[in-house]
Image (spheres, grey):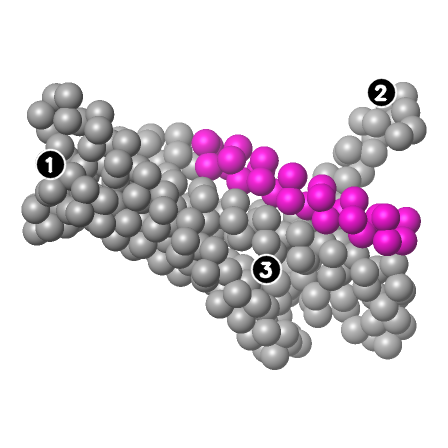
Amino acid sequence: MSFVSPEDFAKQKIAAIQEYSILSWQAIAGLFSRPRYWSEIYSQMDSIGVGSMPIIVLTGFFTGCVLALQSATSLQEFGSVSLTGNLVALSMVKELGPVLTGLMVSGRNASGMASEIGSMRVTEQIDAMRALGTDPVRKLVTPRLYATIFMLFFLTILSDAFGIAGGALVSIAIMGLNPSSYFNNSYRALQYGDVVQGLVKPLFSAFIIATVGCYFGMTTKGGTQGVGRSTTQAVVVSSVFIIIVDLLVTRGMIGIFGR
């Protein structure tokens, strides 16, 4: 690893932020202008959405199971085991569902985007696209951005549903709670602001996953080693950004809705 002066390091980071901002703006602009590569968009929806369903379902379900088990054990000391459904529903819908879904999709798809586009970059396929008059951002980045935003929204809903179902399984089978009481408490615990908060977060997470993954892919250098490096950086940076943005969105939603 080569060392650079603080001045050069700052210049590199500022230049990277500039390149990322330009790439993101071009990808967003591509959503609202032609040509649109619908076949590429549908292909990415299948890869990102359908391909991620098993890991999202398993993650959400077992997170709900663990959450219910831990909550019921703690609430039992206060004689409030019946509130387990409230805690599971609020935790999954407001926080755990959106964040865990974003992190799982980031690990699976941000790395895939970086490696796929990075391989095209080092083999000069992207330069060939430009030579043939095709905009690589519109062809490669915009479909991935559109597909990630669209599919992550529904994957989060799926994760929330299976998380609440997992909590119900543990609460009913192990803790002996009444099924109707659990689901009634889960439903009554959620308010409009909670649902909005849980459905806004995946939009930000999807934007981060797609743009960061594609950015590191488009800026890959150094052959196959560079592809591996870009893949790792895409997962790390997107995961950190998802957590930071989650904090900011949560603070903003609390300011708006008061909870």
The correct choice, above or below, for 162 with respect to 5 in the image is: below
Q: Which residues are magenta?
A: 221-248
Disc 3 residue type (three-letter) = Leu
Front-most of 247 and 255?
A: 247
The correct choice, above or below, for 52 with respect to 39 in the image is: above
Give the residue at x 25% y 38%.
68
Residue 153 within the magenta-colored segment of the rendering? no
Q: Report which residue position mark 3 lands on.
A: 145
- Identify the mark nearer the N-term, 2 or 3: 2
Task: Check residue 82 in the rendering and tell me which mark sits there, or answer none.
Answer: 1
Q: Report which residue position mark 2 lands on.
A: 6
- Secondary element type, mark 3: helix
Main SS, magenta residues: helix
* Residue 163 horizontal side relative to residue 148, left or right: left
- Secondary element type, mark 2: helix
Comparing labels 2 and 1, the label whose residue is closer to the camera:
1
